[in-house]
Amino acid sequence: MVLSQSKNNFFGYSEEMIEVRKDVIVEDRTPLILREHDEVTLGANVFNTTDKEIGFKALISADGLEIGQKEKQFSISAGESTFISWTVKNPKSCPYLQKKCEIPYTISILGDSAKHSDKLEGKIALKAIPSLITNAHRAATLEAGENADLSLKLPENTNIAKSLYTLSLSNNPLQGIEKIVKSLAVYPYGCGEQLLSSTMPNALLQRFTHIFSDIHIEKSTIDKNLKHGLQEIYDMQLPNGAFKYWYHDTKGDMHITAYGVRVLLEMQRSGVQIDDSVVRRAVDYLSEYYRSTKGIERAEVLWAIAEYHRKETEKSLVIEDLMQGYTPENMSRHERMALTYALILANSEKYKSVIDTNIVRIAKELENGNKGSYYYSQLSDMAEFTQMLIDYKAEKKLITYYISKMYNEDWESYWYSTKTKNNAFLAFAKYIEVYGKDNINTLSLTLNGKTSELEFGDTKNSYTKDVPLSQAL
């Protein structure tokens, strides 16, 4: 580009493009990495940018690689290109995790003159051959007096020297749950529903620290999160007792108020100090306005009222209202479950027939794969249904079935909503408290011919033993 200026302050410029390129260009096409015993193709694209055909000689050198014919002859027509390659084998290995392990190489393309020649140099990283890790496992649930053979059939080509045999025993199906509950330490955030859902996990974590002595987390972290979350929740309550959905709202939300009552009560049962007046005013609001609700919202409201009053529920509302307007055919799964939970809390003996019928229907709906709605997913409903079965003192076998099914989910992922995760971990906590913590079990274990007696439930809920596979065989 040329720029000019006159003495009268006139300006002018001119611009032209000039193409700059070499007569012969070599473009690297070698792989980035090699492993021991790899047999690959190394090569380069060669471009002839001249207006005549050129004959070339190609040479390759690479330290340590096995190369058959290192020198090759070829020609390229004017303006054309070709790919020149060599098949090489790598006999080298690189010590595992060695910081620098590379193979230098040079590809030279020689034409009829220095102007028509080019060369490239590079390095190929040498990597260790990865080990294929295969997990083989067997599991069994034992009733009193039963025994099980947990022998494993080893996968083909198992490297015995590098393999480990792990035996894990527990007096409940939640073996290892203490390793992932630390993720419950969530700093509260968001709207009314998010605020309740993100404060609750900290109370659950506090509850689990009472269940498992080997969960190590800074108490100050939990206390800080709970203090912040509770104050934010209290600030969301209106003078009439209702909770707002958004901070700027001037009216209460029945769904959030009902959910808030249940969350605060569960936090209180987890050992968190709750302002009773906040809960009482919210319940009074629900009791005054529940007749204006319908469908899932009414079922949720009645559940919250029954959660607060328990056996005294009938003194606060007409118990028949719990079922007014509901028929088995027109109820959703979550609606049926919330209503059934309210009946269990209010008077499980009086409404036993209705409760038992609804439990059967809910179980069928969960098995049929009905995913529910965005707010009441299948997994979230399953967790609350399991809590309900525990509070109802239903058959342990059915409860354990759902606990085991939920335990197989990947709770360390971000796939599940905080609310769903809360419901699941509350079910886990209730299950351990009822069936695990004080349930004394004695097992006789034989490993590699050696027998030992193990006792669970008093001070310890689980046992894990890692043994080199070479010693277990």
Image (spheres, rainbow, N blue to C red):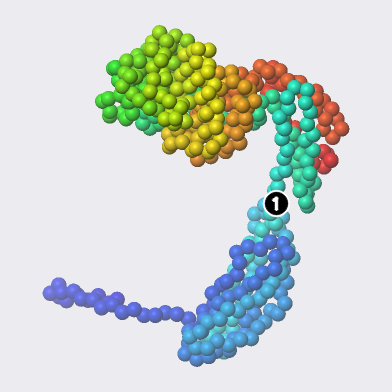
Quarter of the picture containing the C terminus is top right
Task: Report if residue 363 is visible in the image.
Answer: yes
Q: Is residue 424 visible?
A: no
Residue nearer the viewer, 222 or 245: 245
Q: Check the picture and name the quadrant holding the N terminus.
A: bottom left
Residue 159 picture location, percent across and down: 78, 49
Label 1 neighbour load within 10 Å: few <14, some 14-19, many 20+: few
Q: Is residue 458 above or below residue 255?
A: above
Residue at point 78%, 23% (across, down): 145
Residue that appears at 57% across and 21% down:
390
Q: Is residue 203 above or below residue 94?
A: above
Residue 400, position in %: x, y? 63, 27
Judging depth in this view, the residue of 235 and 53 nearest the camera is 235
- What is the three-letter code of the residue carrying label 1? Leu
Label 1's element? loop
Q: Quadrant of residue 441?
A: top right
Residue at 49% x, 38% y is 371
**In this image, 245 relative to 303: left or right?**
left
On the image, the x and y values in percent for residue 64 come to 72, 68
Q: Residue at x 50, y 35 (%)?
A: 378
The residue at which mark 1 appears reads as 132
The quarter holding residue 67 reads bottom right
Residue furthest to the right: 449
